[in-house]
Amino acid sequence: MMAAAPKDACDLKTARLWRDAALRSRKLRSSLRQLTLSCSDENKLILPENLGDVEVLNLGNNSLEDVPDGLRSLSAGNLHVLILRRNKLLSVPSAVYELGRLTELDMSHNRLSCLTEAVGLLSQLKKLCLSHNKLQTLPRQIGSLVHLEELDVSFNRMSHLPDTMQGLARLRALDLDHNELASFPQQILQLPALEELDFSGNKMLCSSCAGSLPDGIRAMKPLKILWLSSTGLCILPDSFCELTNLESLMLDNNNLSSLPEGVGNLQKLRMINLSSNTFQEFPRTLLRLQELEELYVSRNKLTVLPDGISSLFRLVTLWLDNNRIRYLPDTIVELGLLEELVLQGNQIAILPDNFGKLSKVNIWKIKDNPLIQPPYEVCMKGIPYIAAYQKELAHSQPAVKPRLKLVLTGLKDAGKTVLRRCLTDGQQYSCILGNAGIEVTNWTADAERGLTFIVYDLAGDQSYDIINPFFLSPGALYILAVNLESYVSKQFYTSVGYFLHFISAKVPHAVVCIVGTHTDLCQEREIEEKCLDIHHQIALQEKKDSETLQNLAQTVDEALSQDYDMRASNPHAAFYGVSDKNLRRKKAQFQYLMNNRLQILSPVLCVSCHNCSNIRRLREKLLSVAEHREIFPNLHRVLPKSWQMLEELHFKPQELWLTWWDSARLGLQAGLTEDRLQSALSYLHESGKLLYFEDNATLKEYVFHNLTKLIDILNVFFQRDASVLLQKLMNDTNVDDLRATQFHHYVEGFLLHGLLPTHIIKLLLKPHIKTQQDLQLILELLEKMGLCYCINKPKSRPLNGATAWYKFPCYVKNEVPHAEAWINGTNISGQSLAIEQLQIEYSFPFIFPPGLFARFSVQINSHIVHRSDGKFQIFAYRGKVPVVVSFRPSKGALQSDVLSIASHASLPNIWTAWQAITPLVEELNALLLEWPGLYYTVHVLCSKCLKRGSPNPHTFPGELLTQPRPEGIKEIICPKNGSERVNVALVYPPTPTVISPCSK
């Protein structure tokens, strides 16, 4: 059988095009007596006696270096077919030449370097296969094989053919594929019976015929199959068009850019392959080939397919992949017999209407196109799905349905889950264990008005502090659930005040409804007293916070009223050295915070989920607030149809999440360009349909449309329940005691130290992981969310299958950092005595963002090495320079939470300390941008005070980090100890930080 053509367009057709020859051979042998022999264990082949009646002898695949004894004796028998393929023969054994009755000889896949003149003795041969050897030529006696019908000498090293070849008057099939013939052989032009010729893989490089065929090719009129792949053809002569019996023509992998007009005269042509050429325009002469069934024009430079393609109404196969086609003509849908349509790797954005008329297509490839309509996901499913989509699109009119995101938050035992179910189901619940983590449900609150709430039930467990903020967004309505049965006045801040600060810091100007739960367990007077206390303390907290912000704003105003030179020369000034630009920015921040206080609804709504007391009233309250146009104006606006379409498109893919570019492609389908897409995504984020963090530098690459799967993944790691984790690990019924003990060890290590190896993570995420790539994508996402980091990520493929370990900093419980040498193989030496210390402090007077230290711990991992983590402290190095990150929780209402970043070096090398901490400062500033309502201050601690061990070192304004060092000044004054002077290099970084600490 002749060799296969190049891949893609040709692979599917090789067997079909040459099946006739194979079928003829099988028919020839089917009625013959056959014998197949294999070598014995001693690797020696012994012919049995009495083989006189054998007509077909197969000795192939035996690694023979010579034929077995006794083969010569078969010359007097009835042997007609001898198969010696896939052996190690260096030459044709003399015994073979004596088998004068042979009609078929197969010696392919050996090591033959020559064929002697003795081949003429095999005068009855009809088929000779010598492919995949090392032949450099054929003997002249080959021309004496007057009965030869098929000759296969492909994949040899022949550079010329003997003149006697033209005497093979009965030769019907000739395979010269992949030899070293530099020109088209003149010897074969006059073969009167030749119907099949494969000349592929021979580079026609000689000067007389380079890139072309001889005019004499017109003499080969009997040809039906002609393969000229990879021959360097640049042009076809007009005489080629006289081969009017051609049925199959392979011209792929050449340099053709056009076809002679006469190709349209080849009316018997059923298959033509023009792939891998340089056609920029579709050869219109092909449109005249009305018998054409298979057309391959892959890997060219086509930009347009002509409308006339419909004239090829008998086409069954059409391959147009890897071109530059921008659109398909509407007439393509008239090719009703098409079974294969390959369009991948083009620039097709829109498929023609009525594409479903191509209902017989079963091989369909469309990937790697910028598909807009229908969407890529629909197109990939096949023609029936495209047809259904187009039909629906033509008749559907999307309806506008108002919806609002409703977020339930509060302490662990506040009754959020029971409250959610009472609201959404309208049923009584006496007790529900709310330990399922975060849950999202849809609640149609008013079917008549079509108002739907997308309810986010946030987990109250402290382990969820790091991920709950991801689910808060502007434009949502917030319910703060308070357990009135357990509430006491002294715990106001824990139960209520903290959550108000939390929501305000993340979502300024949010609307909050306070709901008291468990009223069935309280006396009526007790309920009234506790509700009044909550109202009173909310008012006190709001008043205190507002006064604090007003006082700070007044301080900024006073500083701005001073001349900058005066302010820069007075070390006792509130904003010593701070530029007017930075002060104006700070003033704008205070103004923003004061203008965007929470909208806290009153009174406290008290409910009981045990008897559904006041649940109806709560529903009515929520509906009334939702429909208030001044509070939720977005709920009532008419949305562009493109936004509605974008929403629909986002909820069809089944992936765990979408990349920004995936979302942008969906936007194009909806008619939204990239500059308009972000607004639509922000709307979908605010309405609760998906998550899109446009202000997060790493997460804005993703659009989280599949909330259920995302939340399922997050819940796995943050439920902090050993029994649940063990249950997931031991789902496999074949877990033995040793394995179970190991699982217990891993779970204990996770809950104590936050450590998990990848194979355990894979087991925990088993429902969401189908491939290793899925696991890597999830781990990459968790890292980008700032939830974990790999502590021993190899730079190359790990040796001996070393396991990668991941650390979840929020689970670290040990107060003091310790070296994790048992995994990292590193030791952290103690700090040397600091000559000069740099320390940047961030103070948070109202609230320290939950999970911030843990996320910061992850974000800085790419900047540091040799780290050792404690619950509130990280020792590490940046290069060879030590850095320390510390968090100091407040110990009272008058103290602030403090996060500091420190390093040290000698004064001449202090730039190395700045170089160590500056990237960490910028990472922290980037994280804080996610909290637009958060007030915090930044300071640079005085290195002189630190060196003295002062318990209250002087703090220079953090705004100086964003300013260049003042010219002509080498020292500034620390007012803490008289007039002690500090080198400016210990306060100002060599280069100002990229992100201002107070920019919002």
Image (cartoon, rainbow, N blue to C red):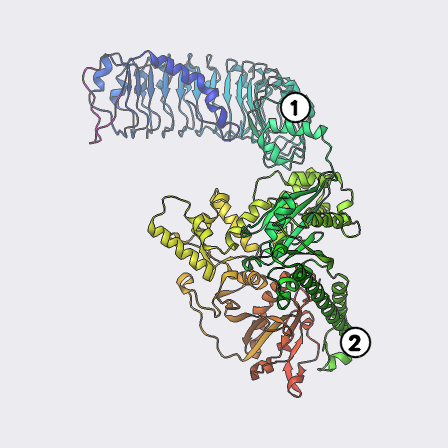
- Quadrant for the N terminus in the image: top left
Q: Earlier in the sequence, mark 2 or mark 1?
A: 1
User: CA gap, disc 2 to disc 1?
Assistant: 75 Å
Which element type, helix, strand or loop, lies under badge 2? Answer: helix
Residue at left offset 67%, top offset 35%: 349
Residue 338 visible somewhere in the drawing: yes
Tell me the number on the disc at residue 558.
2
Task: Decide: is 469 above or below 243.
Answer: below
Which element type, helix, strand or loop, lies under badge 1? Answer: helix
Tell me the number on the disc at residue 8.
none
782 with respect to 481 (left or right): left
In this view, which residue lies farthest toward the right? 561
Residue for badge 1: 332
Which is the main secondary structure of the residues drawn in magenta? loop
503 with respect to 596 (left or right): left
- Quadrant for the C terminus in the image: bottom right
Quarter residue 169 falls in:
top left
Residue at left offset 55%, top offset 50%: 432
Extent of the magenta region? 34-51
Q: Position of residue 487 (x, y in %)?
A: 62, 63
Q: Position of residue 449 (x, y in %)?
A: 75, 40
Task: Decide: is 800 above or below 271.
Answer: below
Task: Single out the mark in the foreground, 2 or 1.
Answer: 2
